[in-house]
Amino acid sequence: MTTVVNLTQQSIVGEIESVLDTYPYHPYQEAFAIPDLRQELISFVLNRIPSFYTAMSNGQIPLAEAEEASLAYYKLPGKPLEQQLHLQNLIHQGICLIVQEKSDSISDRVCETVEPACEPSHWFG
């Protein structure tokens, strides 16, 4: 039996966690701990980048191969930093967009007012 695995999602989830770690706990990390909002952010990013898949036999995924392949797009020769920055920028955009669109629902769930303003100065520097 062969299983098709989306390797892109694995690397995106890790990168989202890294980017969210740079945001204050309240309201950002707290908001994106909500499964629906986290999934919305993952979908936002996945819909804007190419996806990579691999076929695994017998449902067994060699961990090293999967991890290496999941980052393949971001390790292309000559442009790894540019692609990494592109991915991080998409994650920041998604965070800001979702917080702006869902600020009422987020503030109800995290019990304080959410300011949907983004601070882009720390994104690139």
Image (tube, rainbow, N blue to C red):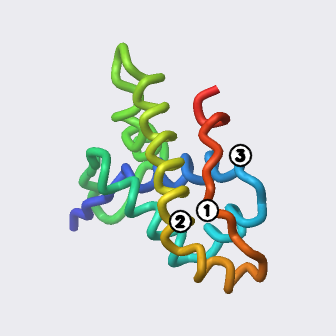
**117 lies above or below 22:** below
Question: Helix or strand or loop: what does disc 3 sit on?
Answer: loop
Q: Quadrant of the N terminus?
A: bottom left
Tag 3 residue: 22
Residue 82 locus on image (x, y percent): 42, 24
Q: Nearer the viewer, mark 3 or mark 1?
A: 1
**29 lies above or below 81:** below
Q: Quadrant of residue 86?
A: top left
Whole-number angstrom distance, CA of label 3 to CA of label 1: 16 Å
- Foreground: 91 or 52? 91
Tag 1 residue: 116
Tell me which residue sits at (40%, 53%) in the image. 45
Question: Helix or strand or loop: what does disc 1 sit on?
Answer: loop
Residue 76 locus on image (x, y percent): 34, 24
Query: Do residues under tags 3 and 1 come within 8 Å of each other at their CB atoms?
Result: no
Q: Which mark is residue 100?
A: 2
Q: Nearer the viewer, mark 3 or mark 2?
A: 2
Tell me which residue sits at (47%, 70%) in the image. 39
* Dot 2 alpha-carbon crowd within 10 angstroms: few under 14, some 14 to 19, many 20 or more: some
**44 lies above or below 102:** above
* Dot 1 alpha-carbon crowd within 10 angstroms: few under 14, some 14 to 19, many 20 or more: some
Amino acid type indicated by mark 2: Gln
Q: Residue furthest left?
A: 1
Amino acid type indicated by mark 1: Pro
Q: Nearer the N terminus, badge 3 or badge 2?
A: 3
Residue 71 locus on image (x, y percent): 42, 38
Q: Nearer the N terminus, badge 3 or badge 1?
A: 3
Tell me which residue sits at (31%, 59%) in the image. 5
Whole-number angstrom distance, CA of label 3 to CA of label 2: 18 Å
Query: Do residues under tags 1 and 2 come within 8 Å of each other at their CB atoms?
Result: yes
Amino acid type indicated by mark 3: Thr
